[in-house]
Image (spheres, rainbow, N blue to C red):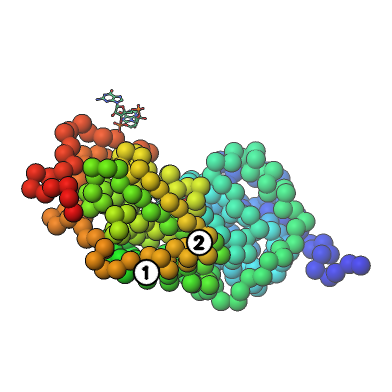
Amino acid sequence: QEEASVQPRSDEKRVLSNVDVLEGAPALSEHWTLFETNEAMFNEARTSQAATLIFALRQNNQIETIARQIHTLRRQRGSALKIIVRETRASLRATDERLLLRCGANMVISWNAPLSRCLTLIESVQGQQFKRLVPEDISTLLSMTLPLKLRGFQTWSTFCEAVGNMVNNTLLPPDGKGVLVALRPVPGIRVEQALTLCRPNRVGDIVTIGDNRLLMFLSFCRVNDLDTALNHIFPLPTADIFSNRMVWFEDNQIAAELVLLREVGPDKWGAPLTGTSDEKKIINAEHDGQTWRRIPEPLRLLSEDRGSAS
Ligand code: C2E
Ligand code: C2E
Ligand code: C2E
């Protein structure tokens, strides 16, 4: 039995593509049309029915525009269109990729796929019907990528509240809201001192101290990326600073741990050492975009005017 929607359309073989996708190569066949910009491609695509449409994404600031264009095309032109996003440089977070797919893209092709593989992937969506539901209002989808509007140190209660809000937000992906980590410093380092080495960069990454532990919530971080994220955040290997690590990443695990965290009384909450402003460099190290480079200099962890007893 044939459905009307799977009948071939006249433009089924057409490929409308941003010129950057082919990395300088000319159009591959008579079916291909190349456009200088995503915008020009989008305008042409607004009359298509079953063509293949390939956006090029070079920078994260293009994500929202492309997401809106995909959403419009999918809602207005239907499920026979094959919509692809080709990432030309590393720029997409997992949350961004999820957004593009939810807006109606069939596929996102990573920057590190070579051109030959990219063409195979483009072939692989031919004949495909888009089956996922695309909500009418894109703002629901956009709000799913927004992290907490907080970064860095928070008081214990603010921290618990913020994590609670994330975990209970049903718009966010189930079991994909982020990672909660508890770190206990090695003997000889107080948790306040460990905090001075903790430098979250990304908005949505928050930290608190209390009960002799340092707690972090890394928004949207996946558990297998935890070490990558911690390496961005600490200028020293975390094993040198912490002897014990506990990790929670599923919603119900995080919610259960939150119950315990909320029972910790204010007498056990910690506060940052005074005089350690956010701007001041705690350790003489620089991140070159790839890795931390330590600039050798003596480092004293215990200041002379404070004992190790707390
Ligand atoms: P990457 O830098 O190797 O990070 C891989 C993954 O580790 C990220 O995947 C994320 O899950 C986690 N991660 C790393 N650093 C942090 C952090 O500071 N906070 C949190 N919460 N998680 C972190 P994701 O998000 O899918 O990003 C994939 C790749 O996209 C990153 O690989 C990086 O190459 C690039 N990227 C994403 N956001 C940025 C950014 O703001 N600036 C730069 N320069 N690159 C970014
Ligand atoms: P942000 O999310 O607050 O991240 C601030 C800085 O943390 C980034 O500056 C980058 O130096 C570092 N950072 C955060 N996450 C990662 C990561 O996964 N890998 C690496 N290597 N570094 C990371 P940057 O790159 O100048 O970005 C400035 C702002 O631009 C970011 O602030 C964010 O708002 C936006 N942005 C950058 N890349 C992406 C992206 O791939 N997706 C989204 N949604 N936003 C991005
Ligand atoms: P790596 O090469 O395995 O070096 C690990 C650590 O050994 C360095 O940590 C540094 O403390 C020490 N080290 C290695 N080579 C030298 C050296 O020639 N002189 C001195 N004084 N110390 C050295 P660091 O500095 O945090 O660097 C971490 C990683 O960053 C290095 O691992 C390397 O992969 C990369 N890196 C840092 N600086 C450079 C650089 O100038 N060029 C290159 N290609 N990579 C660098």
Left or right of residue 229: residue 84: right
- Give the quadrant of the C terminus: bottom left
Residue 72 appears at what percent x and percent y?
59, 70
Which label belongs to residue 86? none
Instruction: Residue at 16% x, 33% y: name it.
Output: 298
Q: Amino acid at mark 1?
A: Arg
Q: Cβ of disc 1 within 8 Å of ligand 1?
A: no
Instruction: Residue at 26% x, 35% y: name it.
Output: 294
**Residue position marked by numbered label 2 in the rendering:** 253
**Residue position marked by numbered label 1 in the rendering:** 262
Residue 104 shows in the view? yes
The residue positioned farthest toward the right in the image shown: 1
Q: Cβ of disc 2 within 8 Å of ligand 1?
A: no
Residue in front for this viewpoint, 37 or 297: 297
Instruction: Residue at 18% x, 42% y: name it.
Output: 301
Of labels 1 and 2, earlier in sequence is: 2
Total number of numbered labels? 2
Residue 148 shows in the view? no
Q: Secondary structure at mark 2?
A: helix
Q: Secondary structure at mark 1?
A: helix
Residue 188 appears at what percent x and percent y?
23, 42
Residue 196 appears at what percent x and percent y?
23, 50
Label 1 crowding class (10 Å Cα cut-off): few <14, some 14-19, many 20+? some
Q: Amino acid at mark 2?
A: Gln
Left or right of residue 200: residue 280: left
The residue positioned farthest toward the front in the image shown: 309
Q: Quadrant of residue 164?
A: bottom left
28 vs 178: above or below: above
